[in-house]
Image: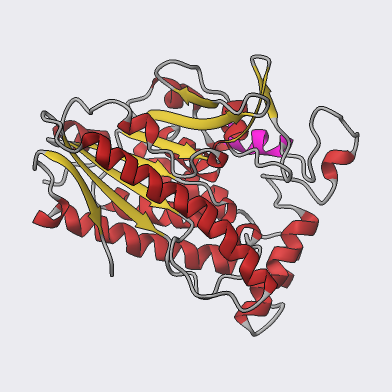
Amino acid sequence: MTVRGEEASAVRNFDVVLVLSGGNALGAFEAGVYEALHEHDLQPDWVIGASIGAINAALIAGSAPDRRIEALRAFWRPALSPGALTLRWASIFETSRRTTAVGWSATAGRPGIFGPLLSAFTPWTDDQPSIFETNQLTITLEALIDFERLNAGPCRYTATAVDLETGDDVVFDSTATRIKPDHIRASAALPVAFPPVEIDGRWLVDGGLSANLPLDPVLSAPPPRATLCIAVDLLPLHGPKPATLGEAASRMQDLIFAAQSRRSIARWKAAYTGREGITLSLVRLAYNEQDEEVAGKALDFSPPTVEQRWSAGYRAGMLAVKGVHTEAMLIGVPGFNVIKLDR
């Protein structure tokens, strides 16, 4: 008999922690990874996210297991606007289509997440300078997430942010804080594009600025039992030499954030080496299928691109699923095991 959902988590002899990085529109990849895990009974016991990862994590933790894919699809595949329909047929060339999609989002915004260009300037507020407004994201989150389940359900939720004034890391965890939409919105408040969010007198911004792949919450203390940590990284460490200014800008962004992930994993591997009494396997699933991505890729929310990223994530997620049933995943092997899965 196949055991599904929260029951599957209860009978496993190991915990599953899902760590989701930032990357704005690239986050559709994370939804695909989760779908593969979901279909094969690898429901997470704890989800941790930064930026768009915090949003995807909230959709997962804040939905009943049988509604999680539906919630993710509602966020990533909403009813098409007239503009989106036009973009679908904007060009027969993929690069042109994606570039047009980036320009559309940069000008018109992404309904349900952020407003049109300069929407935050009306009315102007000196304490929240930004290019776009994100108030509508609150409405979207309230519509798609069961906050009672998010705060009191069996799946633990954590989002990270950064104090804009002090630079301190800020962690919101459902075991200690009652999570509201503003906590999630703060985690995704990337300056200068999106306004900071005030919570308890502190102005907070995107957690990805400090750690785009937020591993610290789960690795800062040894897990109480065997743990499989699946870390989904949206920005690749390796990539081709840029040929244009746009490609150079995109590659710079990749390196800034992906290098964070590399250093974080190396730091924690060194910290756990030689320690006894832990059984933890860390699997990093990176969005490496980026040959067709363009400069400004994080603003390409067009339906065809979302579908392609979702499918790429599903394929990556299946690597983890297959690994659980092989010795490659080292489940049950004592120590801190960093597993690299390549197609």
Using the image as rendered, state which of residue 282 and residue 138 is in the foreground. 282
Query: What residue lies at 55% left-to-right and 53% top-to-bottom?
Result: 76
Quarter holding the C terminus is bottom left
Q: Magenta region's main secondary structure?
A: helix
Query: What residue lies at 40% left-to-right and 60% top-to-bottom?
Result: 313
- Residue 133: image x %, image y %? 76, 40
Using the image as rendered, state which of residue 309 and residue 60 is in the foreground. 309
Q: Is residue 11 left or right of residue 213?
A: left
Q: Quadrant of residue 173?
A: top left
| Rendered view: 175 above or below 270 | above
Q: How is the image coloured?
A: secondary structure
- Residue 126: image x %, image y %? 86, 29
- Residue 333: image x %, image y %? 8, 43
- Residue 223: image x %, image y %? 22, 28
Do we see residue 43 in this rendering? no
Q: Residue furthest right?
A: 123
Using the image as rendered, state which of residue 94 and residue 127 is in the foreground. 127
Q: Is residue 72 left or right of residue 123?
A: left
Q: Quadrant of residue 310?
A: bottom left
Query: What residue lies at 66% left-to-right and 76% top-to-bottom?
Result: 244
Query: What residue lies at 68% left-to-right and 45% top-to-bottom?
Result: 112
| Rendered view: 33 above or below 291 | above
Q: Residue furthest bottom?
A: 92
In this rendering, the count of numbered labels is 0
Do we see residue 262 in this rendering? yes
Q: Is residue 284 left or right of residue 176?
A: left
| Rendered view: 95 above or below 194 | below
Q: Is residue 47 left or right of residue 14?
A: right
Residue 249 on the magenta segment: no
**Magenta range:** 135-143
